[in-house]
């Protein structure tokens, strides 16, 4: 599993990292592991704007359903269409190809103050 070097994680188990001027958002490997086998993902429409902390999607597994929260404020520029058809891809890789949405954000620098780097996140959840 490859973890992006600049990845930041939220306490609600979402991650975010910058790539080509947009921010990729997804669920951490720990969150996916806790959920178990993923069977459904609901993602927002492109162009929808969210404030940090707002719910932007839902994920369902054989164990539970969970809401997905925005780790930063932004406007959705892309959704991972492949996950809608094959949500089980999240179980194979939560980082490489299993990002959920991409957003543009003008507030990343202020929104990321309570996010933590991946190594610190892993220490806190283990």
Image: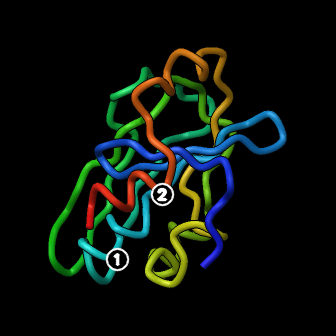
Answer with the quarter of the image where residue 53 lies.
top left
User: In the image, what residue occupies the spot 49% across and 49% down?
Assistant: 15
* Cα distance in 3D space between marks 2 and 1: 25 Å
Left or right of residue 64, residue 56 in this image: right
Q: Are marks 2 and 1 in contact (CB under 8 Å)?
A: no
Q: Quadrant of residue 81?
A: bottom right
Quadrant of the rendered image containing residue 34: bottom left
Q: Mark 1 points at which residue?
A: 38
- Camera-nearest residue between 112 and 103: 112
> Looking at the image, is mark 2 or mark 1 earlier in the sequence?
1
Residue drawn at x 73%, y 36% is 22
Q: In this view, does 51 lie above or below 22?
A: above
x and y percent of residue 16 in the render? 56, 44
In the picture shown, does residue 39 fall above or below 70? below
Q: Nearer the viewer, residue 103 or 5?
A: 5
Looking at the picture, how far across and down is residue 120, in whole percent? 42, 51
24 on left or right of 122: right
Q: Is residue 39 placed above or below 3 in the rendered structure?
A: below
The C terminus is located in which quarter? Answer: bottom left
**Mark drawn on residue 119:** 2
**Point 32% across, 61% down: residue:** 59
Q: Quadrant of the N terminus?
A: bottom right
Label 1: how many Cα within 10 Å (few below 14, some 14–19, many 20+): many
Few, some or many residues within 10 Å of mark 2 (<14, 14–19, 20+): few
């Amino acid at each position: 599993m490859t973890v992006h070097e600049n990845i930041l994680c939220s306490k609600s188990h979402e991650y975010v990292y910058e790539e080509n001027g947009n921010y990729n958002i997804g669920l951490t490997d720990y969150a996916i592991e806790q959920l178990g086998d993923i069977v459904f993902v609901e993602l927002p429409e492109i162009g929808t704007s969210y404030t940090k902390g707002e719910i932007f999607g839902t994920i369902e597994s054989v164990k539970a359903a969970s809401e997905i929260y925005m780790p930063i404020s932004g406007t959705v520029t892309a959704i991972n269409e492949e996950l809608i058809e094959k949500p089980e891809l999240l179980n194979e890789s939560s980082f490489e190809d299993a990002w959920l949405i991409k957003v543009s954000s003008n507030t990343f620098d202020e929104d990321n103050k309570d996010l933590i780097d991946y190594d610190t996140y892993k220490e806190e959840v283990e």
